[in-house]
Amino acid sequence: MSEVLLEAREVSKRFGGVKALTGVSLTIRRGEIYGLIGPNGAGKTTFFNCLTGLYVPDGGGFVFDGQPLQADAPQKAAVRGIARTFQNIRLFPEMTALENVMVGRHVRTCAGVLGAMLRTRATQLEEARIRRRAEELLYYVGIADRAGDLARNLSYGDQRRLEIARALATEPRLLCLDEPAAGMNGAETEALKGLIDGIRQDGITVLLIEHDMKLVMGLCDRLAVLDYGQKICEDVPAVVQKDKRVIEAYLGEVPEDA
Amino acid sequence: MRHPILRALLRLSRHKALLLLGGGAILLALPFVAMLGGQAWVRILDLAILYVFLALGLNIVVGFAGLLDLGYIAFYAVGAYTWALLASPHFGLHLPFWVILPIGALLACLFGVLLGAPTLRLRGDYLAIVTLGFGEIIRIFLNNLNAPVNITNGPQGITLIDPVKFGAFSFSSRTEIFGYTLVGPQKYYFLLLALCVLVVGINYRLQHSRIGRAWQAIREDEIAAKAVGIDTRNMKLLAFAMGASFGGIAGGIYAAMQGFVSPESFSLIESIMVLAMVVLGGMGHIPGVILGAVLLAVLPEALRFAVLPVQQALFGKVLVDPESLRMLIFGLALVLVMRFRPQGLWPSPERKRELLAGQEGRT
């Protein structure tokens, strides 16, 4: 088992004349929390969408766990062990929190139509396992008491947690979080930090897009910075923070004598 | 060890058990009561149950998976013609029902996949238009497949179709039981009722399974469903196939019961009618769909009987042609229901909450 979990090779994506990603390469190691930052419109979410199969890259590709990732359909990425959350939360609003997580188990379970119609012993056992695992995950992310509520009725922070629980239900090896702290207050962000750290300790590699610099710098082992669809820097947080190009990307050009 | 069904019954509360027994007794007694008003009423009951069957099939596609299908009656037609061709003098074939019904269901299922496959990327309105076209194509094919080789006998339809038979027991003839003469429609009633109970069970189990959850997930957010690894293509095809095969079975029974099929029984209005049953009752909610189907199947017939005498009593003469007035009242009733109960007459608890919350948001 190699140390590298995901390798992006020269990933490019254009939308008409807009180059959203230009030859982005990066490597994510097993068990690390890897941050992807950059100003708005830098291509972070586009990169996520390419990785998880929502977009097909125009050039380049991914190697996941030593095998090329055929990222032409999102469900294939999920089967391979890549789970994600969305920047603008996408839950199943009319299903309960528990059911949302149970849907996440879909890809790791196998009951078919016949099993469901005949309600065989195997189906019943599997269904009980799905439910138990979903309950465990709700407890794990800290919203076990909301299990029976419709997803749409949860608070914003709880919806974010539920989305993470649903992603974890697919048994990912790489968990991609798209701005999980967006719209959270300080206390919620602090709790989220603990949650992400815990997920990593359970052996799941985390890829994190985030604007909250305190969270990113405190949590990530390594970072890549995107600007105008290109990777301008990839290193540990302490180095990235001092990188001249990164500071320019965020603050504009810095005068020589500053 | 007790039988599982008996155990399930014993677990129910006394209230529910009484409800179940009472409802069952009423359902069993219904054809005998209706017979007092004449055989026509028993036929109306038969058709009502047949529509329940159809509506439950369409509910899988529309209610569970959220795919708007305006050509559902095509599968009903496929089932009906399968039976008609395999059990009538038209080709001289007289296969038994346990051969034809599975063939009809499989064939309808195949057509369901044929319709589903090219429309997978379509949503909402676009899907509705394509399915509408598909339904019409099937009907027009049936209408015109009498030349150069006569397969469907064209607009004349196929007559003298065999009834459902268990050995020597035919469902179309009269039978004496305990001194009571059971007529054909009454026997079909019990056959349809038994099938319907089966379909309700299957529907319920599908809804509360891994498959049903996946359908609901696709209905609510297709991208999120894909992201958690649901193969939306296969799941949609499955919904189409399941719905279609129920339609096929219903069609087969219909052909056997009527003894006659022709393309005009499978027009667009029938598709719309079945869809209206699903929507009026409460999309995705099995008891609601059953209620919608029964109401919409029985109401026009009941109006047919009521319109004439009421006019006679009110005005002393018949002012408006009963047939047109009947559809007018029927349409008005539909509009009123949709205006004042957009969630359907008997929606699922979740759907009710959804609509109520939407109203709160507006005010």
Image: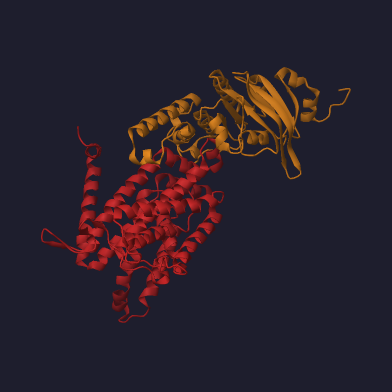
Chain colours: A orange, B red
Horizontal placement of B276 versus A193: left or right? Answer: left
Identified at 46% across, 50% down, the residue is: B240
Q: Is residue A200 above or below residue B360?
A: above
Q: In which quarter of the image is residue B11?
A: top left
Q: In this view, does B120 lie above or below A160?
A: below
Q: Which residue lies furthest to the right in this view?
A: A257
Q: Which residue lies furthest to the left in this view?
A: B179
Identified at 58% across, 38% down, the residue is: A73
Q: How many labels does the image show?
A: 0
Can residue B56 be seen in this snapshot? no
**Residue closest to the eye, A157 or B221:** B221
Could you tell me which quadrant the N terminus of chain B lies in?
A: top left
Horizontal placement of A57 versus A101: left or right? Answer: right
Percent x, y of residue B52: 34, 55
Percent x, y of residue B265: 39, 66
Can residue B179 be seen in this snapshot? yes
Percent x, y of residue B119: 54, 52
Percent x, y of residue B178: 11, 58
Q: Which residue lies furthest to the bottom in this view?
A: B317
**Residue closest to the eye, A101 or B341:** A101
Horizontal placement of A7 versus A250: left or right? Answer: left
**Residue closest to the eye, A114 or B287:** A114
Q: In which quarter of the image is residue A62?
A: top right
